[in-house]
Image (tube, rainbow, N blue to C red):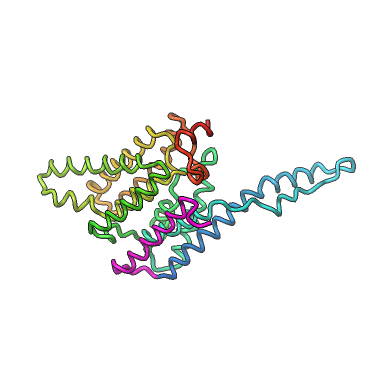
């Protein structure tokens, strides 16, 4: 049923942002590329889940076939033709909408490459059944790296205050349910502090400072991408350190290497740090089912320890 899962609200809000951006910001985004991104993400998710669900049964059938004898006739495992129902199509839809909001290209093939690699990264790069790359961010970096017609426009939202209020309101609602507001606070707080120190050091006016922090793309990144609960560190102290590290690397890449897409490269480069932090500070792994059942965070910890 719709709006029973917190991801339904995220899909609704991202779709609203997409309509708003096309309608009010004069984006050159073609609607057919949005369709390509959604279809590619959903199909790749379904195929990857089906492949991973039937692989153990297929392996068992082959092993039984090799051991077959007259005394032990082979009985095929029929679970092979009845895979489990997909449970992550909502997450795939969120990845598709995130790519549509952030990635720009002129060719279908580039969007297909970004969307398929974004979903496959969840199945390839994982430790203990937990992926550590943000799927949409992985797809963006892959498209920028492997093609010549992909780009990201960090300034596409401008610095209008009402966009900031909209993103903060909707993002705050999601983060309150998911319980990952600390990650956004650590990232934005650290980045704002570093920019304030640099602003004072250079003697610039505060208009420059607020111009950087009011970027709609920066807020979207902080509220909807860096807080992906399935790929970020499990423990609170780990998330604070991880988010502050991404803010520091973003600050360096943006101000000393003049990289306009610094936030995306910083998240991509430090994503594997999640593995080490989860090893140093253990905590229950996030599950969408606990959020769906409206369990408190303390109750989730009791059920997973």
Rendering coords of residue 5 (x, y %): 49, 51
- The residue drawn where x is 81% and y is 41% is 67
Q: Nearer the viewer, residue 208 or 270?
A: 208
Rendering coords of residue 32 (x, y %): 44, 70
Q: Nearer the viewer, residue 297 or 75?
A: 297
In reply to whether residue 5 is colored magenta, the answer given is yes
Above or below, 293 relative to 115: above
In the picture, measured across the screen, residue 27 lies left or right of residue 42, that is left
- The residue drawn where x is 40% and y is 61% is 15
The number of callouts visible is 0
In reply to whether residue 211 is colored magenta, the answer given is no
**Highlighted magenta segment, given as a residue range:** 1-30
- The residue drawn where x is 32% and y is 67% is 27
Rendering coords of residue 154 (x, y %): 29, 57
In the picture, measured across the screen, residue 282 lies left or right of residue 54, that is left
- The residue drawn where x is 22% and y is 40% is 193
């Amino acid at each position: 049923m719709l709006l029973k899962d917190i991801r339904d609200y995220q899909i609704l809000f991202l779709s609203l942002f997409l309509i708003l951006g096309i309608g009010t910001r004069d984006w050159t985004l073609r609607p057919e590329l949005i369709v390509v991104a959604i279809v590619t993400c959903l199909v790749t998710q379904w195929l990857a889940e089906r492949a991973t669900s039937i692989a153990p049964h297929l392996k068992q059938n082959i092993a039984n076939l090799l051991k077959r004898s007259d005394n032990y006739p082979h009985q095929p495992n029929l679970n092979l033709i009845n895979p489990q129902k997909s449970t992550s199509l909502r997450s795939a839809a969120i990845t598709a909408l995130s790519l549509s909001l952030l990635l720009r290209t002129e060719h279908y093939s580039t969007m297909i490459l970004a969307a398929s690699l974004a979903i496959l990264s969840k199945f390839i790069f994982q430790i203990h059944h937990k992926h550590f790359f943000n799927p949409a961010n992985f797809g963006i970096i892959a498209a920028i790296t492997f093609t010549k017609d992909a780009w990201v426009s960090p300034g596409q939202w401008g610095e209008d205050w009402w966009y900031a209020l909209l993103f903060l309101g909707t993002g705050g609602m999601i983060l309150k349910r998911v319980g990952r507001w600390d990650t956004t606070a650590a990232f934005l707080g650290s980045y704002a502090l570093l920019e304030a120190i640099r602003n004072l050091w250079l003697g610039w006016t505060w208009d420059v400072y607020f111009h950087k922090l009011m970027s709609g793309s920066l807020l979207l990144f902080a509220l909807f991408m860096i807080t992906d609960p399935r790929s970020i560190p499990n423990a609170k102290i780990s998330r604070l350190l991880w988010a502050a590290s991404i803010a520091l690397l973003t600050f360096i890449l943006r101000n000393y290497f003049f990289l306009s897409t610094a936030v995306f490269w910083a998240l991509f480069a430090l994503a594997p740090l999640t593995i080490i932090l989860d090893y140093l500070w253990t905590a229950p792994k996030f599950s969408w089912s606990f959020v769906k059942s409206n369990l408190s965070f303390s109750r989730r910890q009791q059920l997973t320890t």
